[in-house]
Amino acid sequence: MMRRIELARGRRLTSADVPRTGGIDAEVLGVAQRIIDDVKARGDEALYDYTAQFDRATLSDLRVTEAEMELALAEVGDEFRAAIADAAFSIEEFHQRQVTQSWFTADERGVFLGQKVTPLARVGIYVPGGRARYPSSVLMNAIPAIVAGVGEIAMVVPPDADGRVNSYTLAAAAEVGLTEIYKVGGAQAIAALAYGTATIPRVDKITGPGNAYVTAAKKLVMGEVGIDMLAGPSEVLILADETAEPAFVAIDLMAQAEHDPRAATYLVTTDEELPDMVEAALRELLTMSPRAEVVERSLTDNGVIVVCPDVDVALDAANMIAPEHLEVMMAEPFELLGAIKNAGAIFLGPWTPESVGDYIAGPNHVLPTGGTARFSGPLSVDDFVKKSSVLSYSLEALEADGANVITIAEAEGLDAHARAVALRLAAAFGMDGEPE
């Protein structure tokens, strides 16, 4: 079912062994660009047209009403509302620990330096919709923005063919206090957030995952607004030895595979017998899966088992893949934590399925994909603030540092930079103002 690679001692896994399929297709980029240009030109009219075309919904108003929010809360039931409240509490508690304060320092010469942390004024969060329901994505995008102190949060989500937004998604929005919600999705929603329309004011940054067209649109508007990341197909890598329970490994591979046929699943193991046991468990579990067709295609097309001669080779393989989710089902998972260099989120031990990270534990589930965990991390409070350097020099400090400023400026051939210091010193001390 899953492709196998056996690494002999001394052989390392390479990117050629596990090619990624997460790039943005040129044709998709072209379609996204045309939609963006149309929204820039026609505004709300284009949004209504694309919603009718792609979502089969004829709308009279883009904004979700208070009555729709109240209906959603009535429909979801008390059990869901209690669960989403617990999740929101855990997520907020985790993200509160990420808050960075402004800081300042001064020395005896009169140099005052620091960093001022300012929340973004307005952000847009994209939540997948239509036939899908992702209330957890509402929490994961909105809560760090709220904790950061963002002034305005606009949420966009595609409606279903009846022109409604999923009740579970709206209930999650109500839980965290979101009131500015628009029934629009796809590249057109990204364009509206980036450039603004009569109904949707533009934002400073856009976060949240979507389909290929959403990702392409985020790439195209990047620079006009900030974005969180370019999300590709979801991924899980399970690092396992002979102590791993095959059924646990199998169900966690399936949990990622059921997202999308393009989802990538990896089992990296030091136990030669485990792959056969896991595949046997997969075959049995697939008979009970309502998404068996999606799961089987994902495992067949993008599933890889890597059998390694020892733990060091296995860790090296995991770090090379740099997965979105990394589960460690080995005898001493905490002892391996320091050796894990590249992963969006790390799940230690057999009782920590990726599902708890998706919903309830607290860490953010918006994570780097496609190997970008080599240089980036999860969505966080830091994504919703900007940092300004603060400087103030006394005359004494400028006199002390001035010669070095002039020397470096002259080396770079920037005369006015040097004169900016020299003229000030001349004014203070009666010199000629010419750099030496």
Image: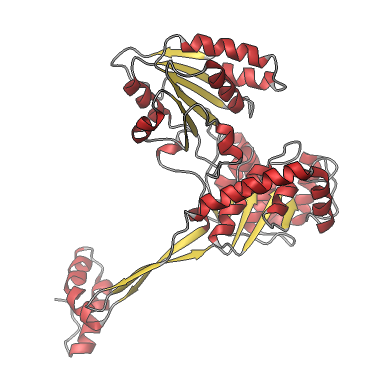
**Residue 129 makes an appearance in the image:** yes
What colour scheme has been applied to the protein in the rendered image? secondary structure
Residue 369 x, y percent position in the rendering = 50, 35
Q: Residue at x 49, y 18 (%)?
A: 304
Q: Nearer the viewer, residue 354 or 160?
A: 354
Task: Give the total number of marks visible in the rendering.
Answer: 0
131 sits left or right of 276 in the view: right
- Residue at 72 percent of width and 37 percent of height: 132
Residue 199 locus on image (x, y percent) = 74, 60
Q: Is residue 125 above or below residue 5?
A: below
**To which quarter of the image does residue 256 belong?**
top right
Q: Horizontal placement of 140 versus 276: left or right? A: right
Image quarter where the N terminus lies is top right
435 vs 257: above or below: below
Which of the 4 image quarters holds residue 149? Answer: bottom right
Specify the farthest residue to the left.
Answer: 436
| Quadrant of the image containing the C terminus | bottom left
Q: Which of these two is toward me, 102 or 113?
A: 102
**Spot occupied by residue 6 in the image (x, y as percentages of width and height):** 40, 12
Farthest residue to the bottom: give it: 430
Q: Residue at x 19, y 64 (%)?
A: 411
Q: Position of residue 138 (x, y in %)?
A: 65, 47
Against 145, residue 436 (above or below) is: below
- Left or right, 12 with reference to 364: left
Residue at image x 39%, y 28%? 320
Q: In the rendered image, is residue 185 in sight?
A: no
Between residue 17 and residue 267, name the one nearer to us.
267
Q: Is residue 199 above or below residue 113?
A: above
